[in-house]
């Protein structure tokens, strides 16, 4: 019989959306706001074929926002988003 000295298994780090939820719950925001943030983050990730946001930058944000502007007609929010995330 082989003995294993590996010790206890190391816990996995929390997933991205769980981290976002935890951060949002530290702020005075409603559960609806949290749900909306999670939905937009999920849409962003799916738009880029499930790439992790850590691997993306301003070009990917720009592509996502352009898609929203042309398909969802949300252009009113574009200047503020670009100012915050694409500089």
Image: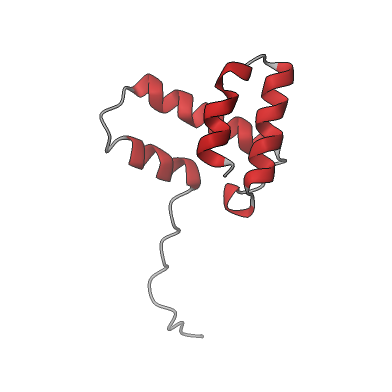
Closer to us: 83 or 49: 83
Q: Residue at x 72, y 26 (%)?
A: 67
What's the colour scheme?
Answer: secondary structure
Q: Position of residue 24 (x, y in %)?
A: 34, 36
Q: Position of residue 55 (x, y in %)?
A: 63, 54
Residue furthest to the top: 73
| Quarter of the figure with residue 25 | top left
Vertical relation: 38 (above or below) 86: above
User: What is the number of callouts on the image?
Assistant: 0
Q: Residue at x 46, y 85 (%)?
A: 3
Q: Position of residue 63 (x, y in %)?
A: 71, 35
The quadrant of the picture occupied by the C terminus is: top right
Q: Position of residue 48 (x, y in %)?
A: 70, 40
Q: Horizontal placement of 31 versus 51: left or right? A: left
Q: Residue at x 50, y 37 (%)?
A: 84
Q: Residue at x 39, y 77 (%)?
A: 7
Vertical relation: 4 (above or below) 17: below
Vertical relation: 66 (above or below) 7: above
């Amino acid at each position: 019989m082989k003995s294993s000295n590996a010790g206890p298994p190391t816990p996995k780090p929390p997933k991205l959306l769980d981290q976002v939820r935890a951060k949002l719950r530290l702020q005075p925001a409603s559960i609806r706001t949290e749900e909306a943030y999670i939905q937009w983050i999920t849409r962003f990730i799916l738009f880029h074929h499930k790439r992790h946001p850590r691997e993306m930058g301003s070009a990917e944000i720009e592509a996502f926002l352009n898609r929203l502007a042309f398909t969802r007609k949300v252009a009113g929010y574009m200047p503020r988003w670009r100012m915050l995330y694409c500089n």
